[in-house]
Amino acid sequence: MRFRPEQHLRRQSDFRAVREKGRRINCGPFTLWCLHRETEITPAPLPRVGFVASTASVGHAVLRNRARRRLREIFRRNQELVPTGCDLLLTARASLNQLDYAEIERKFIDVCRQIASVKNK
């Protein structure tokens, strides 16, 4: 499935809302913030996601870009596991670029299942 433009968190206010109102989950190589948004307009809005890789936590530009690309691809391939109407914020850590892609993907899948089980309760 494609990673559509309407699925990107773009505004600073959206990033801030996810951090302030959302739930934080530590996943090792990345931190995931999740906020379930309630909408009256559409019954099943697509999940939205934003990616953060700072110089302090990840390193120079090449490492930051690699970390964001890996997280973007993992989200793109597994977005059907994210509950509809969720805003996610994935914050990369330095260890992200040192792990295998499959291990990072497994951690993302595990946390998506955890989010889905919380939403269904």
Image (cartoon, rainbow, N blue to C red):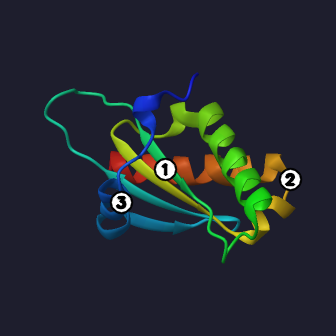
The mark closer to the camera, 1 or 2, is 1
* Cβ–Cβ under 8 Å for marks 3 and 1: yes
For the residue marked with disc 1, what is the amino acid? Gly
| Image x and y of residue 109, in percent | 63, 46
Q: Work out whether 52 lies above or below 10.
A: below
Q: CA distance from mark 3 to mark 1?
A: 10 Å
| Left or right of 5 in this view: 40 | left
Depth check: give the residue in front, 49 or 13: 13
Residue 18 is marked as 3
| Left or right of 7 in this view: 51 | right
Q: Work out whether 36 lies above or below 46.
A: below
Query: Residue lying furthest bottom in this view?
Result: 56
Residue shown at 75% from the left, 70% from the top: 59
Residue shown at 54% from the left, 34% from the top: 79
Query: Residue lying furthest top in this view?
Result: 1
| Image x and y of residue 96, in percent | 75, 62
| Left or right of 62 in this view: 55 | left
Residue shown at 72% from the left, 46% from the top: 70
Q: CA distance from mark 1 to mark 2?
A: 22 Å
**Secondary structure found at label 3:** helix
State which tag comes first along the sequence, 1 or 2.
1
Q: Residues within 10 Å of mark 3 (few under 14, many from 20)?
A: many
Q: Residues within 10 Å of mark 2 (few under 14, many from 20)?
A: few
For the residue marked with disc 2, what is the amino acid? Asp
**Dividing the image into 4 quarters, which one contains the N terminus?**
top right
Q: CA distance from mark 2 to mark 3?
A: 28 Å
Which residue was labeled with disc 1?
A: 50
| Image x and y of residue 5, in percent | 46, 30
State which tag comes first along the sequence, 3 or 1.
3
Which residue was labeled with disc 2?
A: 100
| Image x and y of residue 73, in percent | 68, 38
| Left or right of 66 in this view: 18 | left
